[in-house]
Image: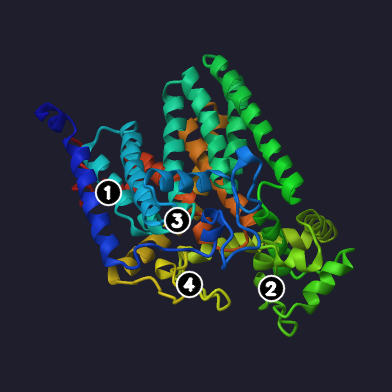
Amino acid sequence: MKNFYVRHKQIIWIMLIIFAFRLAVYFLNSPYILYQNDTNTYSVFKATEKINNPPFRQNIFKGEINSLRTPLYPWFIKLVRFIFSSPSGYLPIVISQSIISLFAVFVLYKIIRKFTNNKKVLFWTTLAYGLQPTIFHWDKVIITESLSLSFSVFFAYCLIDYLENPKTRKALWLAIFSFLLVMLRPSFLSVFVIIGVFWILRFIINKKDRNQSILGFITSLLCTCLIFAYINANAIQNKTPSLTKASIANKIMNLVDADIWRNNNYADITKIIAESPYWDTSNPSGGKNYELFHNGIAWRPFEEKYNLTDEYINEYANDTIGKNKMTYIKQIGKNFINSAKPFVSTLIMTSSSDKFTGDIDIGYSAIYEGKEDVTSWNFNALTMLSLLLNGLSFFLYIYIFVFISFFINLWKWIKGRIDWIELGLCTLIISEILTVVIGCPTDFARLLQPIIPFVAILLFKQIAEGKWAFVKMKWVDRLFIKS
């Protein structure tokens, strides 16, 4: 036992510090369970007085598909409730997410150890991630962000571990895990596609692990068939020709934001929009009609009232995009610019119709214990400082240094000196940004959360390998001296 403590003393103390800090911040910041406006779509499986049109059933083994959500997070909720014997409770979910999130910090430590044995680098970089409130506060929110952050760390470990020592089982697990990410959160589809391309590139460039690349590609191909089968089942059962109907609603939002929703051959839908009480005809740029499309299309009253299907609404969206390609592309460009804004300012966004006042730039709304009364998040000095540092640092690093690192590594690849890990992490980050910008025109800061582990690992790798000039400064040397 003593030898175990001596061998693992550093990580034991790191985990104890992070656990104690998170526990203290958790109890200092009420409410202890947070519900976002999408929570019910993951966790309500039976009709209730509040939501009965329809219940968001999710049991793929019985042929029931939730048209709004992919199945992994609803399954996670069901499993946790079964283990804790709590059919409708949310506290067990918060506890489970917190445990998984804490384990993800340990996995992050293992990743950094692959880059360096410098104990001070390991200590401070792991703490920098583990003590970040804007990361672990998601653990108390009943939505996919917490698992997405943790799973991003696990996926990064699988990728880096494979690149370090390619093995058949590692190739198999890497392909399967990328599929699980899609089933957790559809925006991870870009990660799944990149892994498919990764196997092709590895087969061409690395002759030593071609057998692993073939197996990985075949597994990814089989998982692709499963994804298309799921989309087909969703289309048959719910008339939703996509992984989730949220992607259709988000596409509509882009049309409304670009003010091109009138320019198409679908007079019935444009008439509905124009006559909608939500639409501010005197100020189209200000009245983005999110209530009609996000709460209307996504939550069914719209299609039921006007007898429209997701398939028909999707056809309308595609027709409108086809007739206004350049304007739509310009809107995507605006989305990219807007996606950076939450990282440099603390924006409080309210939604009066949903009575959410806690919807801030880290992307969630607070309703205490599921009651009707609204309770905002407790903004203490620590929280605000964390938001400021998180915003400024990640804006500078993501939108400047990641893109620079990407092109540098691309140039190295051309010159025959490819760094698979850095190029892979940069590609994953940029692809996720583009996926969110194109497919999810709102809540950028929330939807971009899953790239934070990739960003952190890239940053810590560069620090560990001495690629950042500032680590040679005297004040930093005191923290990062070689041991």
Query: Considering only order in the chain, which callout, 4 or 3, is on the residue closer to the N terminus?
Result: 3
What residue is shown with label 3?
88
Q: Is residue 330 above or below residue 64?
A: below
Q: CA distance from mark 3 to mark 4?
A: 33 Å
Q: Label 1 belongs to which residue?
A: 127
Residue sticking out furthest to the bottom: 282
Q: Residue at x 41, y 46 (%)?
A: 80
- Which mark sits nearer the N-terminus, 1 or 2? 1
Q: What residue sits 29% from the left and 60% below the top?
A: 26
Label 1 to label 2, Cα distance in Å? 42 Å
Q: Label 1 near label 3: C-beta < 8 Å?
A: no
Hey, which residue is sitting farthest left in the picture? Answer: 2
Does label 2 or label 3 sit earlier along the sequence?
Answer: 3
Mark 3 → mark 1, Cα distance in angstroms:
35 Å
As drawn, 160 above or below 120: above
Q: Position of residue 372 (x, y in %)?
A: 47, 74
Residue beneath disc 4:
347
- Residue 208 - label: none
> According to the image, label 2 marks what residue?
289
